[in-house]
Image (tube, rainbow, N blue to C red):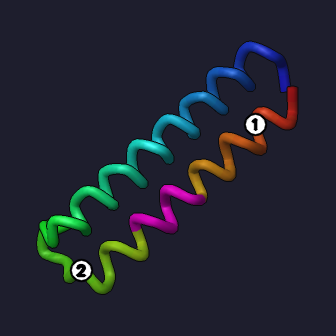
Amino acid sequence: MESGPAWFAGLTFVLFGVALLAWTAARAVRRAPVADGVGQAVAVPLSLLAGAVSLALGVWCFTRL
């Protein structure tokens, strides 16, 4: 992967992952709904999984530099 696109993709994935994990944690601590119309027991783990996958993809992009 070329250097420019790898940096951009990696940074995008990492920022999204961090923001999603922080937002999910803030909503879960306040017992506020994480997703509209979905129970906490389903929404929190799926959001955490999506954030972790996004972080992993960002790290993978950075290893391709």
The residue that disc 1 covers is 61
Instruction: Choose the circle earlier in sequence order: 2 or 1.
Output: 2
Residue 40 placement, left or right of 11: left
**Distance CA(mark 2)–CA(mark 1):** 31 Å
The relative height of residue 42 versus residue 24 in the rendered view (above or below) is below
Q: Residue at point 46% right, 40% down? A: 16
The relative height of residue 29 versus residue 62 in the rendered view (above or below) is below
Q: Position of residue 12 (x, y in %)?
A: 54, 31
Q: Position of residue 60 (x, y in %)?
A: 77, 44
Q: Position of residue 55 (x, y in %)?
A: 61, 49
Viewer can see residue 35: no
Say which quadrant the N terminus sits in: top right
Residue type marked 2: Gln
Secondary structure at badge 1 equals: helix
Q: Main secondary structure of the magenta part?
A: helix
Where are the magenta residues, as a range?
A: 47-52
Secondary structure at badge 2 equals: helix
The residue that disc 2 covers is 40
Quarter of the view holding residue 61: top right
Work out whether residue 10 or residue 1 is closer to the camera in this orientation and state it. Answer: 10
Residue 57 placement, left or right of 3: left
Nearer the camera: disc 2 or disc 1: 2
Q: Residue at point 15% right, 72% down? A: 31
